[in-house]
Amino acid sequence: MPLNESPAEGVEVLHAAAVAADLTGRGALAVSGPDAAELLHGLVTNEVKGLRPGAGRHAALLTPKGRMRAELAVLRVSESELLLDCDAPLAGPLLAILQGYVPFSRSVLEDRTGETGVVHLEGPAAAELLLAAALPEPGPEEYAHAAGFLDGVPLRVVRVSRAGEPGFDLRTSRDAVPALLTLLSSRGAAVVSPDVLEAGRIEAGLPRWGAELTETTLPNEAGLERTAISYTKGCYLGQETVARIRTYGHVNRRLVALLLPIGCAAAPGDDVRAGEETVGNVTSAVDSSRRAARVALAYVKKGHDEPGTALAVATKEGAAAGRVAAVPLER
């Protein structure tokens, strides 16, 4: 059932049932060969070599000084092939980075972005809807994935939440996307624009590349140590900085959510203030009827990031007072 109303209505369906959105354009890079896992293991922040086929991991690729170059998921397809998923704007840059390393290993790098279609299904009824559509459901772990077919076309279902609810990426050929959306709609999913997932993402307090995650970000500032960093795997690019942050126990700023009056004008780029002092900046914002607040994600200085701290956002319409909440926000 297509849903052509506002993103706010779509977010209500996201939390109550299930929505499906076309995310075609997400990066799809395959690394294969006898050294593929070893190569990626030495580059990204999380464990790769120990992944079994059908499993996946959240990870980051850093500069030698520990700043973000990419956020990605690593999916182990087989013993000799791994698939990398990333936000669309990262597909080209990540490909270029890997092209600098692949020639020195027994690995082959293939850009499958142009041929890959991605539909995201999310909501409390998402798993039930997969079953109704006779599509495979992967294991319970985040980024677990399972292969299947849609009318004879290969399809891979990946367990991943993009807006705070149970969710799945359905990766197939681009030509199969219309039929896949029709199938999901016929089983009860509301077909929505990606704006609905974006609103749900902000409401859930999840960082995204290009908003909260940029080339100036340290992964710990965004809380990525919870899901994307292994402290036991051994060497990788930027490890020394990550280890030093862990040893000394803090970064100078943290990503938080500010709960502000609903309908206020808080927007990306606005200053966050404690009294007259500027202590941070807003990166994303959306009105949330679920939280009865405008949720603004922001980086704020250490000392102002504790939940409950009173801060204000300098909007174009004046100061909007709010309080800090930890991210990700509770469902």
Image: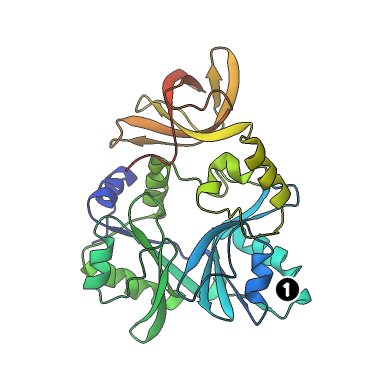
Residue at image location 27% in from the left, 72% down from the top = 183
User: Up-down: is 158 above or below 202?
Assistant: below
Q: Tell me the quadrant of the picture where the N terminus can be found.
A: bottom left
Q: Is residue 173 left or right of residue 281?
A: left
Residue at image location 72% in from the left, 81% down from the top = 106
Residue at image location 61% in from the left, 36% down from the top = 249
- Between residue 103 and residue 34, name the one nearer to us: 34
What kind of element bears circle 1? helix
- Between residue 261 and residue 256, name the one nearer to us: 256
Q: Give coordinates of residue 329: x percent, y percent.
A: 39, 39
Q: Give coordinates of residue 117: x percent, y percent.
A: 46, 71
Q: Give coordinates of residue 318: x percent, y percent.
A: 47, 17
Q: Is residue 327 left or right of residue 283?
A: left
User: Up-down: is 109 above or below 17?
Assistant: below
Query: What is the residue that sits farthest to the top in this orientation?
Result: 276
**Any part of residue 295 in sight:** yes
Q: Give coordinates of residue 6: x percent, y percent.
A: 31, 45
Which residue is denoted by mark 1 in the rendering?
102
Q: Tell me the quadrant of the picture where the C terminus can be found.
A: top left
User: Up-down: is 194 above or below 119?
Assistant: above
Badge 1: how crowded within 10 Å, few (<14), some, or many (20+)?
Answer: some
Asked where in the image residue 138 lies, by quadrant, the reply is bottom left
